[in-house]
Amino acid sequence: MDFVEAAIGAASERRSKRGTPSKDEDRPLVVLSYAQSLDGCIGAKDNTQALRLSGPESMRLTHCIRARCDAVLVGSGTVKNDDPRLSVRISNHPLSVQPRPVVLDSRLSAVSSTSNVVTLNNRLIVFCQYSDSDPDFTTLQSKRAVLESHKVAVVNLASRHDLPDNLDPASSSAVSSIPIPLMLRVLKSKFGVNSLMVEGGSRIISAFLGLGPSCVDCLIVTVAPMFVGSGGVKAFDSGSEGTDEGKKGQSVALSVVDPVYRQFGSDIVFYGSLN
């Protein structure tokens, strides 16, 4: 789709013009994309009722972004609540050509052998983080072994053994949260991921937005013509504490540079870069 190509093309051009090319080359090009309501919600707090924000036209756009990227990332909460497939489902796209699903699951509590991202055999990558002295070390190692028996690539960011030689493991004092910059460098150097779509959920979105342009090259947001109200989950909570899906980001105002808008069905979609 031309809108997606224009968005990623503009991000690639901005990235090439930045003054720190060596840092950018260490990680994939990152596209953060999600749908929200007019009052900034991406879902409902009550997970028993699905909240559909994207119309069919903007949903197709989401699949086009997936098709354009090497991998698609979500957090453990999204896997628990939605059990997503993270695959491309649009006409004329070959089923055999799919982005690699990536899940941030520090305690290996969300992904199981029956999760869609495992059973679809799309070369799942799971990032976790725990030290040898963790009181649950044996249990976590057992969970890891089960996933690996289903051909899942599990990376413990606190383990020297799991990382490329040029990267240092995460500090044992920060094992409660996934260090996103390190995770991105591992995706690039160990798995050859050159472009990454980040979909959510809210803690993932907040973590990436909080890190700003150092970890996000392109922002694509769908705005649905509806209000969710007090029962909604906000897309961006810059003041939230760090979670197993990402460290707390900087608590600052963000703006989108050079936004481009287009209507897809009843939804408005815009893309741009963060300041």
Image (tube, rainbow, N blue to C red):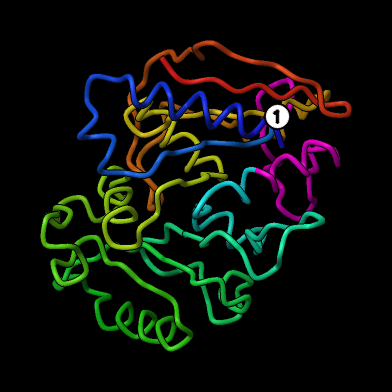
Above or below, 47 against 251 in this view is below
- Relative placement, left or right, of 168 versus 194 is left
- Relative side of 146 to 186, left or right: right
Amino acid type at circle 1 is Thr
Q: Position of residue 173 (x, y in %)?
A: 15, 52
Q: Residue at x 54, y 32 (%)?
A: 8
Up the image or down, 152 lies above or below 85; here it is below
Name the spot of residue 152 as percent of width and height, x first.
44, 76
**Residue visible at 41% across and 50% down?**
245
Nearest the camera: 18 or 208?
18
On screen, residue 214 versus residue 61, left or right, reads left
Q: Residues within 10 Å of mark 1 (few under 14, many from 20)?
A: many
Which residue is depicted at the point 53% across and 53% down?
Answer: 72
Above or below for 22 versus 26: above
Place of residue 274 in the rendered image (x, y in percent of width and height, measured from the top left):
45, 19
Query: Looking at this view, is 21 or 208 the one in front?
Result: 21
Residue 175 quadrant = bottom left
Q: How many marks?
A: 1
Q: Which element carries disc 1, helix, strand or loop?
A: strand
- The boundaries of the magenta stretch are 36-64
- Residue 149, image x and y in percent? 43, 89
Residue at which label 1 appears? 222
- Quadrant location of the N terminus in the rendered image: top right
The relative height of residue 145 versus residue 63 in the rendered view (above or below) is: below
Task: Work out which quarter of the rendered image holds the C terminus and state it.
Answer: top left
In front of the other: 74 or 196: 196
Magenta stretch holds residue 58 = yes
Magenta-colored stretch includes residue 227: no
Q: Nearer the viewer, residue 174 or 62?
A: 62
At x 65%, y 60%, the residue is 87
